[in-house]
Amino acid sequence: MGYSEQRSTLVPATVWRRQGPVAPAEILPDGCMDLIWTGTGLLIAGPDTGPVTATGSGDMVALRFDPGVAPSVLGVPAEEMVNGRVDFADIAGSAQARCLSEQAAAGEPGDVLERFAAAQVDRSPPPRWLHPATSLLSAGHQVASVADQISASPRQLQRWSRHHYGYGAKALQRILRVNAAMADLRTGRSAVDTAHHCGYADYAHMFRDFRSVTGRPPADFRPPMMGCSGGADQGFSSPEQPISGDQGSAA
């Protein structure tokens, strides 16, 4: 029962599983695309630009591809899939969708999806610039600097980004940085330290990005407080509250 995930050993992706009745869950943008076995068929979830509520009570198994990888596997530009949920047959054709669905139904769906994706990546590997660009953008490097480091012009990077990620490079950077900040906040790190650690100019900058990507303030992602310490918990809910300490570099 519940949800679990593990890294794929064959492709740049995470295998996730949802088993049994699960309450509706909020799915937040992460720059990724998913190939999902629903128990009866295959579905592609495109890159999201805002929160999505996932419902359904059946078991599911899926591959969540690292940012930018899915177009090499699925043969469709990510920009055509933004905020989309599309039947795999509409992309791959009914014959291939039926064959893969039959294999998933008869075997271990996660293994089936991994083998399929690995074969596709062998035939059409992701471009060499993809991983370094993703890492640099996630680390907060300026778009022009990222383009220079992968030997591309900013205009080329924007065009490549829309094809592979579904977003422009700046939008992807915002999403990746918010996800990194969410992970920091969930460890109990203060909002001030998180803003600094993730390279935001200040807390107000982080607050605006959280609102843009998740629709919620950063404080919503901190662990519940176990009690009132009387100290200065810095999980601010408003960007007007002051922060102190060294500031990160502006995006």
Image (cartoon, rainbow, N blue to C red):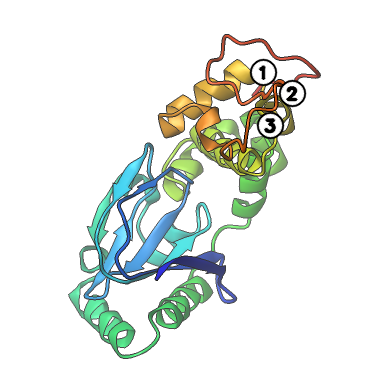
In the current view of this chain or complex, which residue is farthest to the right? 246
In the current view of this chain or complex, which residue is farthest to the bottom? 106
Query: In the drawing, does residue 88 fall left or right of residue 114?
Result: left
Residue 125 in sight in this render: no
Q: CA distance from mark 2 to mark 3?
A: 10 Å
Q: CA distance from mark 1 to mark 3?
A: 10 Å
Callout 2: helix, strand or loop? loop
Q: Amino acid at mark 2?
A: Gly
Residue 229 in sight in this render: yes
Tell me if mark 1 has few (under 14), some (14-19) or many (20+) residues whose alpha carbon lies within 10 angstroms of its own: many
Q: Which residue is mark 1?
A: 202
> CB atoms at circles 2 and 1 under 8 Å apart?
yes
Q: Nearer the viewer, residue 110 or 23?
A: 23
Which mark is drawn over residue 194? Answer: 3
Callout 1: helix, strand or loop? loop
Q: Which residue is mark 2?
A: 248
Residue at horizontal 44%, vertical 29%? 216
